[in-house]
Amino acid sequence: MSFKVTVPATGHTFTVENGESVLEAALRQGIGLPYGCRNGACGKCAGELISGDIGYADELRSMALDEYKQGKTLFCQARPKSDLEIKVREITSGQDIEIKTLPCRVEAMELLAHDIMKLELKLPETERLQFLAGQYIEFLLKDGKRRAFSIANAPHDDRYIELHIRHVPDGQFGDYVFNGMKVKELLRLEGPLGSFYLREDSDRPIILVGGGTGFAPLKGMLEHAFQVGIERPIHLFCGVRALKDLYMDNMVNDWLQQHDNLKYTPVLSDPDEGDDWQGETGFVHEAIVTAYPELSGYDVYMSGPPPMIKAGMDAFYAHGLPETQIFSDSFEYSDDALKAMGITKPRS
């Protein structure tokens, strides 16, 4: 049996299925309720029950129990017994989310391409990292330095934090990931960070542009869009140097079979002789303005190396894209690293 939950302050409604908590159902349907641990320990999900009846699946602990004793409802554990009206703070932007410093453990490592490693990070049992699709975290290293990486999974799938780390020339952290890091290793991170996240309050078609591991935050955006049922047309462009640099391509092609609103265009800037590439070549921003010579009616999200971001912005503005409809995340690399990756300053 399912029940309807209404948040009168925003007018949002969502349905809770049998066995779901209020929080689980809200996140599944794209309603950003706050949380910290999702297991009844921290009390960050607390709000007020205006009307209706609930029960709790598990015993409340620590701060959550204190909130309960003060008359608050813990929505990560609350199961509806009737339709509900609730009062709770909703997460609508990155500024609404608490930035945390947390320990994490490397749970799994997987080579996605010759120079790209996927990490899955596990947080302590009493913690979850709430984030918006497209944001990033920073590792806090022992030498005081920081290394930033985009979160590649969607907010609803937050059991692990997924990162895609590229092995760039002279990159000390990348060298360590590829040559020294082991599963079960402990690290510290801070996040979520950044204003690069999917805006859900627009009705415009979406163009996603990723260069190299710039695909990572776009993957999280796409998985979130599919999860919450966004039906706007979405066109994903991925720009890499050669075919060996194109990763998770099979997954994207599977998405094409499942989602009629998705289009996909990989673009190779310098294919190897053995690639036998029949698709788009050149710079990825040139492929976009060829396909969309008038961009005023689109939202564009770009993530990748600074030369790609700069060239894309210049080209897109020239083709009618308002500044308020472009969102970007620039991955900083040294000039030597960019050159080794086959990335040069695009033609203006």
Image (cartoon, helix red, strand yellow):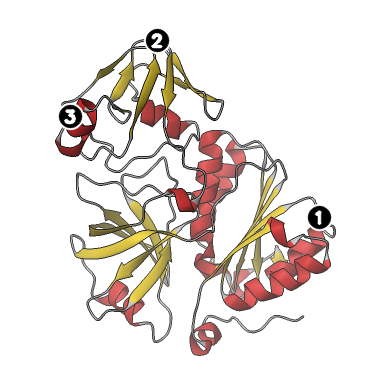
Q: Residue at x 84, y 60 (%)?
A: 293
Q: Secondary structure at mark 2?
A: loop
- Of label 3 and label 2, which has the lower sequence position? 2
- As drawn, is 313 to the left or to the right of 33? right
- As drawn, is 266 to the left or to the right of 34? right
Give coordinates of residue 287: x percent, y percent: 75, 65
Q: Which mark is residue 296?
A: 1
Identify the amino acid type marked 3.
Answer: Leu
- Of label 3 and label 1, which has the lower sequence position? 3
Q: Is residue 328 above or below residue 29?
A: below
Q: Are marks 1 and 2 in contact (CB under 8 Å)?
A: no
Nearest-to-viewer mark from 1 and 2: 1
Q: Is residue 223 above or below residue 15?
A: below
Q: Residue at x 70, y 56 (%)?
A: 325
Q: Is residue 43 above or below residue 303?
A: above
Residue at mark 3 to residue at mark 2: CA–CA distance: 24 Å
Identify the amino acid type marked 1.
Answer: Ser
- Looking at this view, is 282 or 82 the one in front? 82
Q: Residue at x 53, y 59 (%)?
A: 195
Q: Is residue 238 visible?
A: yes
Determine which residue is flagged by label 2. 1
Give coordinates of residue 43: x percent, y percent: 26, 37
Label 2: few (<14), some (14–19) or many (≥20) C-alpha neighbours in 10 Å:
few
Toward the front, the furthest residue is 70
Label 3: few (<14), some (14–19) or many (≥20) C-alpha neighbours in 10 Å:
some
- As drawn, is 300 to the left or to the right of 316? left
Residue at mark 3 to residue at mark 1: CA–CA distance: 51 Å
Q: Residue at x 82, y 68 (%)?
A: 318
- Of label 1 and label 2, which has the lower sequence position? 2
Identify the amino acid type marked 2.
Answer: Met
Determine which residue is flagged by label 3. 60
